Amino acid sequence: MLSRQIRKFQDTFELFLSNQASAGILLIFCTIIALIVANLPITQDLYASLHGFPLGIQVGAHALIKPLYHWVNDGLMAIFFLLAGLEIKREVMAGELSQFNKALLPVSAAIGGMVVPALIFFSLNSTGITAKGWAIPMATDIAFAIGILSLLGNRAPRSLIVLLTAIAIVDDLGAVTVIALFYTQEISINYLLYAAFSFIILLLMNLAGVRRLSFYLIIGAVLWFFLLKSGVHATVAGVLLAFTIPGKNTPLPKNFGKLSQEALSEVENHATKNQGQANEHIKALMHYLEDLVHHAETPLQRLEHALHKPVMFVIVPIFVLINAGISFQGLNLHQSLTSPLTIGIILGLILGKVIGIFGVVFCLIKAKQVQLPKGINLQHIFALSLLAGIGFTMSIFIADLALGDQAVLLNSAKLGILIASLIAGSLGYILLRQAKTKK
């Protein structure tokens, strides 16, 4: 009885992890928890001390000790950007960004969705320290946006999900570029040279045909360390590593299909004779099949598949728990909600994304430069541009880079991000429920 309940729990848990909407639901839950813990009198001091809790390693005179807050933002988020980089490379090699006519629509929309929000924000915050936050409304949180589309089921055309994903991937590339160029601390030339040498080694490994992922991950960790010490934000290492992971297939073994079919038939025969019990011979056959499939997959595919669930269901939720806790103690809500910083973020994420994405797509269609994918109309594009206004994870990340040393301004920025994301997500969901799918 107990084993049956355990299996039922496992099946339910696996179903939750396989549902695209689950990541968004989990992030909402983590946001609520972070807000409660950051403001309850009995937990707010613990939450604040958790941020500064020192962690690290020391070998002789050399030490790498950082607060927990920085390990999450500089360390775990580098893995997030590694996954983002793998997705970018895959799309460029064989996806929506692989051909000019296919890439024109998402790339143009993404550029518009980054430039216009930044201009709107900067028009309200052109002077003072808040001007450093100009990139906050540029970002799109793909987990939340895809989660909302998944909740709509058949009302959201598959081609719309593909388009939003492609736009978000280009958006991620833009965010990484902005972080590397504009949110870099004082540069250490020596460590930067060491990082460049590490990156060259990764490139040479790729050119030499090395396909063992462990070698890339070890050198990638070294690259991350050198970038951390150089002053360039360490998360950039994730994207640089992703670009060097091999993405091309090796020639498959001869008679791949025949070998696979024979092995499957043998597994089925032995399983029937042994009443479904896996003996050593069946296990050996399964390992043989695994090796065959291993040759069919690229290292890029294997790593992306391995990282997806840990990133979406562990790393990003931890980031949200650490970063989404806005303390309202000492925060003047009226002043925060009416400040140019908060208004600039809200208008940038909602109005800026609509003008930037929908406006660009509308102009390209009228100029007959692009065609909308099958099953999508302009109402879908308008709703998509609203969903792209869910900045959340990436916007909070950039806000911390820009205003991390200004606690009050950072909390105001986070408040604006949460409000804008809530409005954008709600409006996008409502519009898509009412949208008529083109047949």
Image (cartoon, grey):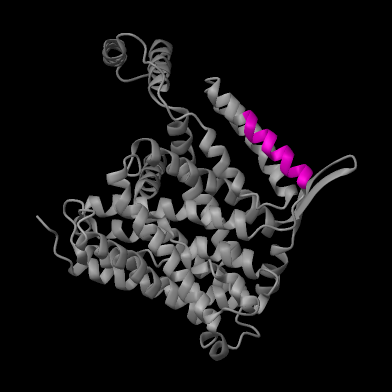
Image location of residue 155, percent across then percent down: 19, 59
Is 202 in front, or is 34? 202
For the stretch drawn in magenta, what is the main secondary structure? helix
Please, which residue is most extreme toward the bottom here? 334
Q: What residue sits 34% from the left and 39% below the top?
A: 98
Q: What residue sits 58% from the left and 24% below the top?
A: 205
Please, which residue is most extreme toward the left here? 439
Q: Which residues are magenta?
A: 189-201
Image location of residue 203, percent across then percent down: 58, 30
Image location of residue 362, percent across then percent down: 25, 65
- Figure check: 55 above or below 328: above
Q: In which quadrant of the rendered view does residue 439 lie?
A: bottom left
**Drawn side of residue 316 relative to residue 272, left or right:** right
Is 155 in front, or is 198? 198
Is 277 in front, or is 234? 234
Q: What residue sits 57% from the left and 44% below the top?
A: 238
Q: How many marks?
A: 0
Reply yes or no: does residue 199 show up in magenta: yes
